[in-house]
Amino acid sequence: VLVVVVLVVVVLVVVVVLFVVVVVLLVVVVLVVVVVLLVVLVVVVVVLLVVVVELVVVLVVLEAVVVVVVVLFVVVVVLLVVVVLVVVVLVVVVLVVVVVLFV
């Protein structure tokens, strides 16, 4: 009985640690996205200031910025989905282990 209790506590600690790691990773990803968006905003403002001088170049740059932002957004979404899937799989594995231990 003591062994089962110790195993359950260890499993719960591992789950909590994994959850904290996932939350930290999500915070880091969000911060990176915010920084990237701020940089893009600065680039767009600079580009708009240059609009009067070189309209064609500005349009190309804006197009490139939009493409970069869309690609980054897709990458972030994919990363978040992967992280969520990993957490779900880990929780399911832990639950199965706990059930097997109790049975």
Image (cartoon, grey):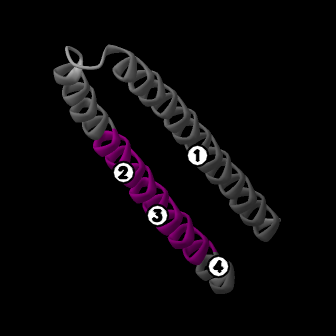
Q: Nearer the viewer, mark 4 or mark 2?
A: 2
Q: Secondary structure at mark 2?
A: helix
> Does residue 52 appear to the left or right of 75 in the view shown?
left
What is the distance, in whole Å, between disc 4 and disc 2 at their CAs? Answer: 30 Å
User: Which residue position holds label 1?
Assistant: 79
- Residue 21 is marked as 3
Residue 82 sits above or below residue 41 on the image: below
In this image, 25 relative to 37: left or right?
right
x and y percent of residue 32 in the render?
36, 49
Please tell me in which quadrant of the rendered image residue 99 appears: bottom right
Q: CA distance from mark 3 to mark 4?
A: 21 Å
Which mark lies nearer to you, 1 or 3?
1
Q: Earlier in the sequence, mark 4 or mark 2?
A: 4
Given the image, on which type of amino acid does mark 2 rest?
Val
Position above or below: 23 against 5: above
Label 4 residue SS: helix
Q: Which residue is mark 4?
A: 7
Badge 3 or badge 4: first in the primary sequence: 4
The residue shown at (39%, 58%) is 24
Does the residue at mark 1 contact the one at mark 4 (Cβ under 8 Å)?
no
Indicate which label's residue lies in the foreground, 1 or 4.
1
Labelled pair 3, 2 in contact (Cβ < 8 Å):
no
Q: Residue at x 78, y 58 (%)?
A: 96
- Name the residue beneath numbered marker 2: 27
Provide the secondary structure element on which disc 3 rests.
helix
Q: Residues within 10 Å of mark 1 (few under 14, many from 20)?
A: some
Residue 77 is situated, as x and y percent measured from the top left of the image, at 55, 36
**Relative to 93, residue 8 above or below:** below
Q: Secondary structure beneath disc 1?
A: helix
Q: Amino acid at mark 1?
A: Leu
Total numbered labels placed on residues in the image: 4
In this orientation, which residue lies closer to the viewer: 51 or 1? 51
